Amino acid sequence: MSELSELHRDALGELFNLGVGRAAHSLSQMVRDEIELSAPFVDLIHAHEVTATLIGSEFKELSMVTIDFEGPFVSKAILLFPERNALAILSNMLDPELTPEEVAEFEQEAMCEIGNVILNACMSALADEFGIQLHGGLPEHYFSDTDSLPIFAEGDADRLVLLLQIRLTMRQQLVEGHLIFLLSVGSLQDLRDCLDAYLDRIGMR
C-alpha cells in the first residue's frame, strides 16, 4: 500500500516536530543564539515529482546534505536549501569578518554539520518513539539545481518521498528548506507498520 492515512500523517508530523525541536536546540547551542525550526508539514509524493514540486519556487540552485539510514525501514534522508538560503544560514554561523569567498569555502563542511544535526535529530525521534534502531551513515554534501537532480531519479521508478517543508529562523532572518526522505514501496510499508504499532501503543488506533 503506497498511501499514508491522515492518522499516519498526523503522527509523522508530531514525531518530526519532536525531531526538529531537538535539532533547533542543538543548533542554538552551536551558534550561541536562538534558532527556531517550524513544525513540518508532511506530504507523500513519487520521487519523480520532487523536481516539479520545487520548480517555480525559489529552489533553483540547491545546497543539500544526504545521509543513508538503515533499520526496520531504509531511507535516504536529505536536507535541501536554496543555495542563497544556505549561505544566509552560514553567514550567521561563521565569523562575520569572513569574506563571501571564505564563507563559500567552509560551506560544504558547515552544511554537513547542520544536516547531520537536523537529519539525525528527526530520525532519532522516530527511532525513540518506535522503539527501534536506525543507523545513519556519514553526511555528504552536494550542489545541484532543479534541472539536474539525479538523486531523485535513481533506482525504483515507484520510489516514494516524504516531503517536509521547514522554516528556520535565526537572528530575525527566515529561510525555508525541505526535509526529504526517499523510501521504496517496501520501506514505506515497513514505516506504516512501525506507525501502526506506535499508534496502538499510545491508544490512538
Image (spheres, helix red, strand yellow):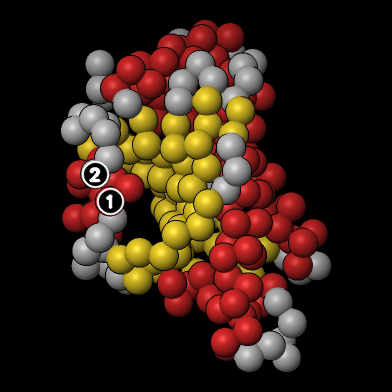
Decide: few, some or many residues near mark 2? Use Cα within 10 Å; few <14, some 14-19, many ≥20.
some
Name the residue carrying label 1: 150
What residue appears at the point 80 percent right and 67 percent down from the top-left corner? Answer: 32
Is residue 40 shown above or below 148? above
- Residue 34 x/y as whole percent: 73, 65
- The image's mark for residue 62 is none
Q: Is residue 10 left or right of residue 130?
A: left
- In the image, taking residue 57 as reference, residue 119 lies left or right, namely right
Q: Quadrant of the N terminus?
A: top left
Q: Is residue 98 left or right of residue 104?
A: right
Amino acid type at mark 2: Ala
In the rendered view, tell whether residue 67 sits above or below residue 165. Answer: above
Per the image, label 1 sits on a secondary structure element best described as helix
Q: Residue at the spot x=19%, y=55% of the render?
A: 52
Q: CA distance from mark 2 to mark 1?
A: 5 Å
Do the CB atoms of the residues marked 2 and 1 lie less than 8 Å apart? yes
In this orientation, does residue 182 appear? yes
Residue 129 appears in the picture as rendered? no
The image quarter containing residue 173 is bottom right
Task: Locate the C terminus by quadrant.
Answer: top left
Residue 20, percent from left and from top: 60, 46
Q: Nearer the viewer, residue 105 or 134?
A: 105
Q: Give the residue type at disc 1.
A: Pro
Depicted 140 relative to depicted 154: above or below: below
Q: Residues within 10 Å of mark 1 (few under 14, many from 20)?
A: few
Numbered tag placed on residue 153 in the rendering: 2
- Left or right of 156? Residue 190 is right
Residue displayed at 45% across by 25% down: 74
Residue 37, x across and y down, in percent = 58, 56
